[in-house]
Image (spheres, rainbow, N blue to C red):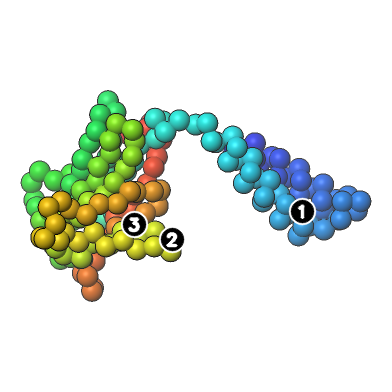
Amino acid sequence: AGASGGLLAACIWHAFGHYPALGGDLYTGAALGSLVWGFTHGLLAWPIPDDLYAGWIRVLSAERYGLRVPIDHEDGSPAERFVGHFPRGLDLYAPAEHGVSELHTSFVVDQDHNYRVRGLTIMPTTLKRLGEAVRLDYDPMRPAPLESDLKMGDRILMGSGDAVSEVEFILLPKEEM
């Protein structure tokens, strides 16, 4: 999808930059080429099924950057992954010095491949995405933890002040598992 969109965009850019009858302007050609690439890529990638992708949580810190954990089970059944600093039994360990409580958040996927994040502690937990921030702190007055849908590239900040851990939600092809 990306290569086809890129090839068509390059043809548009070349045509608008080379032929004076179409304007002979490389800047206009580049702008139209970008629009054509986006449209073509979106149109060709639209029918790709969600079953080919798996959700992952990745730690965003200098000392643990390569650490990532898949959320999905290999058989496609619903799953829940826990993040915190409890030393045994959690799916993703984060140090307490980085503002993480023993059982801080959980990441959930259902049978329809809908991803959600839940805040499990009263310590600050914030879901950040472009132009939006959602507080997921657990409220003892509510019977259930706060949760929100996850989208590709969402970041979850756990902790406050200088002691903050950051985790990112990404979608990768299932071959990565």
- Report the Cα–Cα distance between label 2 and label 3: 10 Å
The front one of 122 and 73 is 122
Q: Quadrant of residue 79?
A: top left
Point out residue 174 in the picture as x, y percentages from the top left corner. Answer: 37, 32
Disc 2 residue crowd, few under 14, some 14–19, many 20+, Cα 10 Å? few
Q: Which residue is mark 2?
A: 130
- In which quadrant is the N terminus drawn? top right
Q: Could you give the CA–CA distance between mark 1 and mark 2, rounded to whole angstroms? A: 29 Å
| Residue assigned mark 3 | 155
Specify few, some or many for label 1: CA neighbours under 10 Å numbering under 14, 14-19, or 20 or more.
many
Instruction: Tell me where residue 63 appears, x and y as whole percent.
Output: 26, 59
How far apart are the alpha carbons under marks 1 and 3?
35 Å
Secondary structure at numbered mark 3: strand
Q: Dot 1 lies on which element?
A: helix
Q: Residue at x 34, y 57 (%)?
A: 155
Q: N-terminal of the two: label 1 or label 3?
A: 1
Q: Is residue 29 visible?
A: yes
Contact between marks 1 and 3 (CB within 8 A): the answer is no
The numbered disc on residue 29 is 1
Residue 93 can be seen in this image: no
Local SS, label 2: loop
Q: Is residue 20 left or right of residue 35?
A: right
Q: Residue at x 76, y 49 (%)?
A: 13
Q: Camera-side residue: 175 or 40? A: 40
